[in-house]
Amino acid sequence: MTKVELYHNDMSSCSQKVRLVLEEKKIRWTGHHMNLRKGETRTKTYIKNFNKNGVVPTLVYKDDIIIESSIIMEYLEDTFPQNALRSSNPANIAQMRLKNRKIDDVLH
Ligand SMILES: N[C@@H](CCC(=O)N[C@@H](CS)C(=O)NCC(=O)O)C(=O)O
């Protein structure tokens, strides 16, 4: 079975968002812990191959390399339907996206 791989950091709230979705959906994953203080997300290799912004999280599954925590969360929901976390109601989905946008644009 193809592995889900997550480039992340234990203190990163963006990584935590993704880890919570992986846990709730019972998706098995392999972690690559990135030391932010040592600049491990700023290497040429990581920026070129995984995350052009030089940050965590980055999710790799099959040929897909997905960045941006809120987008990764929705990618996981679309790719792994078990233990659904997203409402089927379009208005509720819109509210969820507004909340995620606030976290991304304002809080973070
Ligand atoms: N909008 C991005 C933000 C990612 C981000 O800023 N990640 C931080 C940790 S929470 C990071 O990797 N910082 C490393 C650095 O700036 O060197 C997302 O939601 O994924």
Image (cartoon, rainbow, N blue to C red):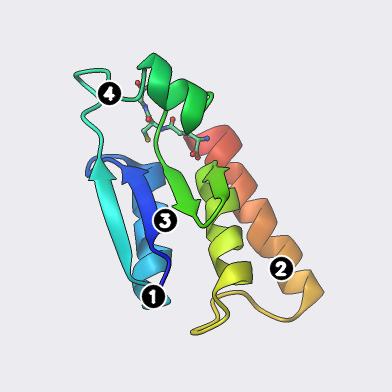
Estimate the x, y position of residue 51 in percent, counting from the top left. 49, 30
Please say if the residues under marks 3 and 2 sit with CB atoms less than 8 Å apart. no
At label 2, the amino acid type is Ile
Marks 3/2: CA–CA distance? 18 Å
Residue annotated with mark 2: 93
Crowding at mark 3 (Cα within 10 Å: few <14, some 14-19, many 20+): many
Quadrant of the drawing holding the N terminus: bottom left
How far is the residue under mark 3 from the one under mark 4?
19 Å
- The mark lying in front, picked from 4 and 2, is 4
Q: What is the C-alpha distance between the residues marked 3 and 1? A: 10 Å
Label ID, residue 18: 3
Counting residues from the start of the chain, the first of labels 4 and 2 encountered is 4
Q: Residue at x 38, y 75 (%)?
A: 24
Q: Nearer the viewer, mark 3 or mark 2?
A: 3
- Residue 26 place in picture, x, y as percent: 36, 78
Q: Nearer the viewer, residue 47 or 75?
A: 47
Query: x, y percentage for residue 79?
Result: 59, 69
- Say if mark 4 contacts mark 2, CB within 8 Å: no
Q: What amino acid type should be assigned to the residue bearing mark 3?
A: Val
